[in-house]
Image (cartoon, rainbow, N blue to C red):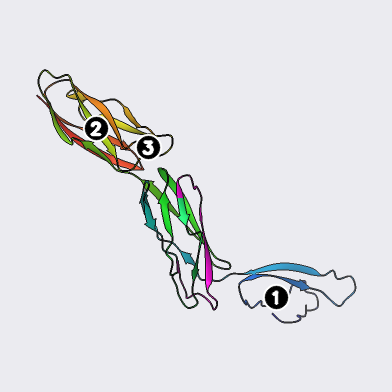
């Protein structure tokens, strides 16, 4: 910016052009030569228009890991750029390493960070670097359910059939409760929920016979565990 500006006679305002340099903060001080003029200051922050980016719509399985590449919209400056990574909730999702270096002239790091699903749910990963626009993306931790058997028959004279529900990874601390329902309670009924104890991968439930026919039973814990079904025929 210019070393000095002149306020025209009768005016109270004058504009000065500030030319940005390297990213960071600086203080500009304005003072006058006349008596009674009190110096004024302002802080200017220079930011790099380049952005740190993370992929969107990432999911990771419970107990599993997934890669989370960090990229820059423009090549890293001389000396490289260190990008820090933080999870908003480490009880659900962790990220490693906590920082990566993007070499000078590159847009991606040689080390690709990984996220690990600790518990079902969602947490935000923030990637930041000094003077760059940060990235913030949610990552969801999910699991998969399967019935065993997925197709079965309850014969005449039998009141119920015991079936298993399997979780794709051991249930986290506190366990996992799954919602159950029958498409046609006039054919079979099921309990409203079943719970996986902490560390368990299977649970059992009774499918109770009501009347002859066919229907589906469902198990889910939306939005983190998608719906799965088993086909039931009652003779």
Alpha-carbon span between mark 2 and mark 1: 75 Å
**For marks 3 and 1 on the same chain, the one whose residue lies earlier in the sequence:** 1
Instruction: Say above or below: 231 vs 78.
Output: above
The kind of secondary structure element at disc 1 is loop
Q: Which x, y percent locates residue 117?
A: 40, 48
Most distant residue in the bottom direction:
3
Circle 3 Cα neighbour tier, 10 Å, few/some/many (<14 / 14–19 / ≥20): some
User: Do residues under tags 2 and 1 come within 8 Å of each other at their CB atoms?
Assistant: no
Which residue, given by chain and number where applicable, does mark 1 sit on? 15
Circle 2 Cα neighbour tier, 10 Å, few/some/many (<14 / 14–19 / ≥20): some
Which residue, given by chain and number where applicable, does mark 2 sit on? 164
Which residue, given by chain and number where applicable, does mark 3 sit on? 199
Q: Which quadrant of the figure contains the N terminus?
A: bottom right
**For marks 2 and 1 on the same chain, the one whose residue lies earlier in the sequence:** 1
Alpha-carbon span between mark 3 and mark 2: 16 Å
Region of the chain picked out in magenta, as a range: 71-93
The image quadrant that residue 5 belongs to is bottom right
Q: Is residue 154 magenta?
A: no
């Amino acid at each position: 910016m210019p070393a000095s500006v002149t306020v025209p006679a009768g005016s109270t305002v004058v504009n000065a052009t500030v030319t940005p340099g390297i990213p960071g903060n600086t203080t500009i001080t304005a003072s006058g030569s006349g008596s009674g003029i009190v110096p004024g200051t302002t802080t200017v922050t220079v930011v790099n228009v380049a952005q740190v980016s993370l992929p969107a719509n990432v999911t990771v399985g419970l107990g599993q890991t997934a890669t989370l590449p960090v990229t820059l919209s423009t090549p890293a400056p001389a000396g490289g750029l260190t990008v820090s990574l933080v999870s908003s909730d480490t009880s659900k999702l962790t990220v490693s390493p906590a920082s990566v270096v993007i070499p000078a002239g590159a847009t991606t790091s040689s080390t690709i960070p990984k996220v690990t699903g600790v518990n079902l749910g969602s947490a935000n990963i923030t990637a930041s670097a000094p003077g760059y626009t940060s990235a913030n993306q949610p990552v969801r931790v999910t699991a998969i359910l399967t019935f065993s058997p997925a197709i079965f028959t309850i014969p005449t004279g039998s009141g119920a059939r015991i079936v298993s529900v399997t979780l794709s990874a051991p249930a986290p601390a506190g366990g996992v409760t799954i919602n159950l329902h029958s498409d046609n309670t006039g054919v079979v009924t099921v309990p409203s929920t079943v719970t996986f104890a902490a560390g368990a991968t299977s649970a059992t439930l009774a499918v109770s016979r009501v009347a002859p026919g066919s229907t589906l039973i469902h198990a889910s814990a939306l939005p983190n565990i998608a719906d799965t079904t088993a086909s039931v025929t009652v003779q």
